[in-house]
Amino acid sequence: MNNKVGYLIRTIRHLHVCGSKLGPSFRTAMRTYTLGISRRKSAIQSVNLRGFLLNVPPCRLESSLRLLSQEVPVYSKGDATAQEQNATKTLLDEHVQNSSSAVDPLEEDRSVVEENLVVKSERSQPQQFFDDLKKCTSPCDVLDLVSKSAISEKHCSNCFTTMWLLTKKLSEDQKHYEKQLMVEHPAFMQLCQRLMQESRSMWCDDLVYSLHAVLKLGVPQNTRLVQTLLRVCQERLNEFDDRCLSVVATTLVTMEKSRNVDALQAGLQLLVEQRIPKISNIFMLQSMMKCFGKDAPLSLKRKFEDRLLKELDHLTPLNAQHMFSALAAMNYCSMPILDASSNKIIESIPGTPFWQLIRVLKSCSILRYRNVVLYSAIANYVTSAIYMWDTKQIVLFLSAFEGLRFRPVELMDILAEKVTSHPDSLNLKDILSVLRVYSLLNHVPKCQKQEFLESLNGALNKYLARISNVDLLKAVYSFCILEYLPQPALSQLLQEDNLNELLKSDGLNKEQNEMMLHCVNMCLELDSPSFTKPATMFIKKPSSPLVSDLPEVREALLKLLGDERMFQQNIQLPHDYNIDFEIKMDANRKKALPVTEVDDPADAPDVQRVAVLCAPPSAFCFGTRHPRGKLAMKMRHLKALGYHVILVHYQEFKKLKNEEAIECLKGEIYSVDAFPVSDVNLQDNI
């Protein structure tokens, strides 16, 4: 059967490329039929291009940087008439002026090429060819037109552009199949050869758009065709206007490092550095910023910043969205630009595409940009338009928020309700993501905590037969932080073979696995003392005691308690926990007791131990004093060990005056009835 189908396909392809009269509907039907048996691999790489495109010796692929003098005038075709040149320049100027509203050179799926095709078709002759080109519905239709037409360099550039535009909106299966047919078409080689021959005499915009389209069509970077276009771009770089430079920059972002790519990028950087003061198009500036990336010199980054600051009055919502990814690409945090972009996004957030919001949040994480108003606006929009997002999209939003330490309570409650109602909607990756987010942000729904955790446990159990040991450990670790023991998963994790495999990892993986196993062990001992652990359970060696200075807290305790003997600092406990300050008091917490005069609380039930924990901002959810997962687990375990826990937000505490600091600690350390109400300034969190 397969042989018959293969013979049928080869026959139809032969008739198609030879120009037999098969109707468009028949060819479309055959493409749809054969998609089911197409191979999911790169169509370009799976075909031997007759030694023309591939297998070029490295010495012939690469070249050194070649730049022309800055005084060289913009290139024009030698055989073009003056009338043609003037008309073309007018159309290009109009194209550049309108680009800010119609074109986004940073979006791969929304290229500047589309508008450029229309402009070029209007100015080229003969018009009949471009009319026929617009009627093509597949790359093979374009190549059929090439095989029966006398094409010029203008035709060549537009053909590649059209073929890419026809494939970019197809599904992955359709793209692979169409590219396979395209490469096997006899006219494809003719078109590639013509592009190489004409590259040095093409209009500049035709050259850069051709390079862009060729790479988008999947032609490998190490081919003679691509390397030739790169070298010609190097030679003619000084002839490029701002639009061409922007397209080159956008193209280079997607390319792997090589000598020709590096040379072109270096030349582009030198040229752009001179032109930055005159470039007013924000999209162009952003595409160049992405091209140069984090390796750009600080002086160039500051020049981009200065230029963008002058254009903030012309910032559009789309500019603002891309500003985050452009600055993240350069790893350059400009607070004035980010603040202005945040305000613009907040004003126009309804209707913003899903992936744009995700990119903004991920860029904030890269830049370490903290803006609770922006985060809240995005979270509120996602929550208000919850009907627009499926479960996987909500999980991605929450993962992005977790990377920023931001806890969107309402959105997390909505997802918890969805998971509780439909746990089967999650695959293993989603389950692990949900567990990670909720455990690290220390969040469970108040009314349905047990139901939510049991639903996640049930969903995880379906994957126990094929889950990796590392993923199993991550899942159990997250459950333990949330004070829940998933029995089937835990039993599988504690098998001797699985534990040995986890502890045999090397480097950082082993250290990470040991940390998670240690936490699981602590939770078994303190949260569920009746649980019987296997003899092979990992026991972490005690680490060196942490020594923290914390002078502001120490000074306040001295003034409050009156004597250094009334408290201890840097106490190391079993289970590798440490306490910044420990105070021993009577059972009612009305009186502090000297440390030397008090027996161990295990032998003296009338003694209450108080643990003062000083936590950095990273231990709290951003914009709140809600402790994150590991800190919340530590507080829970200290309470199980008999401590009354006082949590101090150390960064905020340092801002208090001496009297305020003393009053805050006084209200937390002593019980409410230890002093008259007027004497105690109670604060829920310090």
Image (cartoon, rainbow, N blue to C red):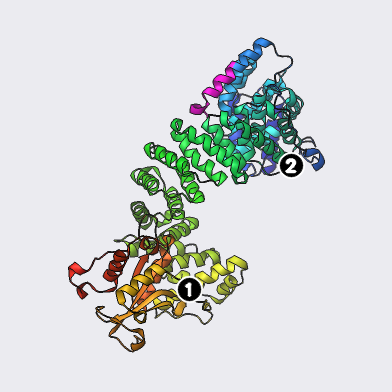
Question: From the viewer's perspective, is 319 left or right of 19?
Answer: left
Identify the disc placed on residue 547: 1
Please state the horizontal and vertical placement of residue 228, each as a whole percent of the image: 75, 33
Note whether residue 680 is visible.
yes
Residue at image x 36%, y 56%? 416
Note whether residue 484 is visible.
no
Check disc 2: other Cα within 10 Å, few if <14, some if 14-19, many if 20+: some
Please state the horizontal and vertical placement of residue 91, each as a whole percent of the image: 58, 17
Please state the horizontal and vertical placement of residue 34, each as a whole percent of the image: 62, 38
Q: Secondary structure at mark 2?
A: helix
Instruction: Say which of 519 and 298 sits in front.
Output: 298
Q: Quadrant of the N terminus?
A: top right
* Residue 193, picture quadrant: top right
Instruction: Say which of 7 and 489 sits in front.
Output: 489
Amino acid at circle 2 = Arg
Which residue position holds label 2?
A: 259
Please check the rendered image and state whether residue 97 is part of the magenta-colored stretch, yes or no: yes
Amino acid at circle 1 = Val
Q: Which residues are magenta?
A: 90-104
Q: Quadrant of the C terminus?
A: bottom left
Per the picture, the main secondary structure of the magenta-coloured stretch is helix
Identify the disc placed on residue 426: none
Question: From the viewer's perspective, is 497 left or right of 570?
Answer: right
